[in-house]
Image (cartoon, rainbow, N blue to C red):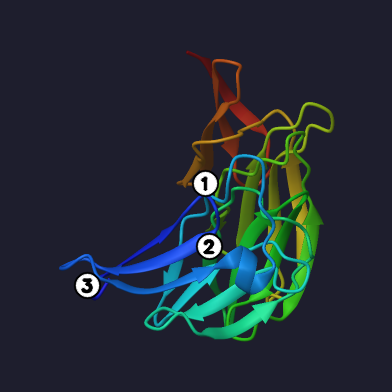
Amino acid sequence: IDDLVYFQSGHGVVYCFRSSSGELVWSADLQKRFGGKQITWGMVENMLVEGDRIFCTPGGEINNVVCLNRFTGAAIWTSPGNKKPSAYCSSIYVRHKNAELIVTMTDGSIIGVDAKTGQFYWDVPQNQTYKIHANAPVYSDGVIYCASENETSNNGLVALKLSDDGRKVTQLWRNREFKNLMEGFIVKDGLIFGAVYNANRWLCVDINTGMTLHSFNK
């Protein structure tokens, strides 16, 4: 973007390079600077850029989610979020009516944070046995969709309706059969498509009811 490339290492260091020359423009160590917590397989979040801002999830107790100036690396705001470690999830930017949100999954939760100020709004339990939330959330028509696999609680795919101001969510439904651990899912034409982890199955789910309409074996 504007000749700038952003990358986060497994050790939680965010780098900004100039693509034309390879010059390092700035870097930010999320562990040293923001108290980020290292996790089992390294911090692998994809960088989220919106306008002049870049968003990261160090997973610290004080600086859980942070917003940086993407040209300088200077902190614009930091949020305590829900104080839980990051969980391999890449956050998404949501523009909902007049609200701007950052939505991601940390260890055991789906969270929503104000994109302008960092104010923490809501937390919905979403556990995974090995603390892996490798799927980015999906937003469509006022609803957040998140999918996880869990050996014990069968959280599966959940639909969360945002309030008009984005400060609250209401669970619409949960499909416990849709256990998608990684590689994500697709929302299209009132349907959700995705694979069941380690089961050689593909599912098609009704977006309004959460009911499984079709199941396909590989």
Sequence-wise, which precedes: disc 1 or disc 2?
2
Q: Vertically, is 139 above or below 200?
A: below
Q: CA distance from mark 3 to mark 2?
A: 22 Å
Task: Tell me the residue at 74%/50% (across/down).
Answer: 107
Please tell me whether residue 80 is drawn above or below residue 182 in the rendered image: below
Give the class, few, some or many, for how many residues have Cα within 10 Å of label 1's Cα (few <14, many ≥20). Answer: few
Mark 2: which secondary structure? strand
Alpha-carbon distance for marks 3 and 1?
A: 38 Å
The amino acid pointed to by label 2 is Ile
Of the pair 171 and 25, the residue shown nearer to us: 25
Could you tell whether 12 is left or right of 35 in the image?
Answer: left
Residue indicated by mark 2? 92
Measured from the top left, where is residue 23 in percent x and y?
A: 24, 70
**At label 1, which amino acid type do we have?**
Gly
**Which label lies toward us, 3 or 2?**
3
Labels 3 & 2 near each other (Cβ < 8 A)? no
Q: Nearer the viewer, residue 200 or 118?
A: 118
User: Residue 182: x percent and y percent?
Assistant: 55, 36
Determine the secondary structure under disc 3.
Answer: loop
With 2 as the anchor, is 20 left or right in this view? left
Front-most of residues 75 and 127:
75
Q: Alpha-carbon distance for marks 1 and 2?
A: 21 Å
Q: Which mark is residue 3?
A: 3
Dot 3 or dot 1: first in sequence order is 3
Identify the residue position indicated by label 1 in the image. Answer: 190
164 versus 110 height, above or below: below
Front of the two marks 1 and 2: 2
Residue located 55% across and 77% down the image: 67
* Dot 1: element: loop
